[in-house]
Amino acid sequence: MLTISRETDYAARVILHLALQPTGSRSTARQIAELRIIPRALVRRIVTRLATAGLITTARGGDGGITLARPPTEITLLEVVEALEGPVALNICTVEPNICPLMPACTVHEAWVDIRDTLRANLARITFAALAQKGGASSPDTTAR
């Protein structure tokens, strides 16, 4: 089964949470962890990776917190996946073609590249603004716990 990691799923939740906030407002790691049901330790690790990728900004102090580095219309699901997982590749040969001794004659390689390119294009079309409009505003009911 091909899957993304749990951290990548959580990273998408973090970005979606921030996309739902009023422009210029900041959220704390604690708020995100509670509202998006993510372990706090993982939120901190994910925030570091998303900040390194340039998707969010962080600030310490009383007025500190986490905010998107760009408008949610400019942040795609592909960026989040690649920030956490690295390049999208169904097979190593799509990233490092020289690694395979069968490469010059391999017809499957073209199929892997086409599939990878289609997946990347689809992920790149999905912005967090669009996800927020599709009902991302609903947060889980944390009072039931």
Image: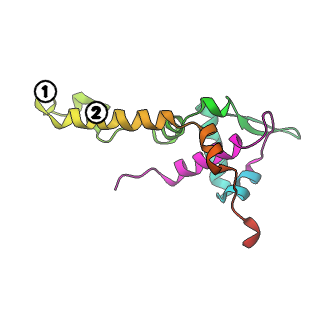
**Residue drawn at (28%, 40%), measured in percent from left and top?**
91
Secondary structure at numbered mark 1: helix
Taking the image as shown, residue 45 lies to the left or right of residue 66, namely left
Q: How is the image coloured?
A: rainbow
Q: Which image quadrant for residue 129?
A: top right
Q: Amino acid at mark 2?
A: Val
Q: Is residue 65 above or below residue 31?
A: above
Q: Position of residue 116 (x, y in %)?
A: 34, 36
Q: Which image quadrant for residue 61?
A: top right
Which residues are the magenta region? 1-29
Q: Around disc 2, counting alpha carbons within 10 Å, would you say few (fewer than 14), some (14 to 19), or many (20 or more)? A: some
Q: Is residue 130 highlighted in magenta?
A: no
Q: Amino acid at mark 1?
A: Pro
- Quarter of the picture containing the C terminus is bottom right
**Residue drawn at (64%, 40%), measured in percent from left and top?**
48
Looking at the rendered structure, which numbered label has been put on residue 104? 1
**Residue drawn at (47%, 38%), measured in percent from left and top?**
123
Taking the image as shown, residue 74 lies to the left or right of residue 35, namely left
Q: Position of residue 23 (x, y in %)?
A: 78, 34
Secondary structure at numbered mark 2: helix
- Does residue 54 show up? no
Q: Is residue 59 above or below residue 7?
A: above
- Quarter of the picture containing the N terminus is bottom left
- Structural distance between the alpha carbons of marks 1 and 2: 14 Å
- On the image, numbered disc 2 is attached to which residue? 113
Q: Is residue 3 highlighted in magenta?
A: yes
Q: Earlier in the sequence, mark 1 or mark 2?
A: 1
Q: Around disc 1, counting alpha carbons within 10 Å, would you say few (fewer than 14), some (14 to 19), or many (20 or more)? A: few
Q: Is residue 135 above or below residue 104?
A: below
Q: Position of residue 92 (x, y in %)?
A: 29, 38
- Does residue 69 show up? yes
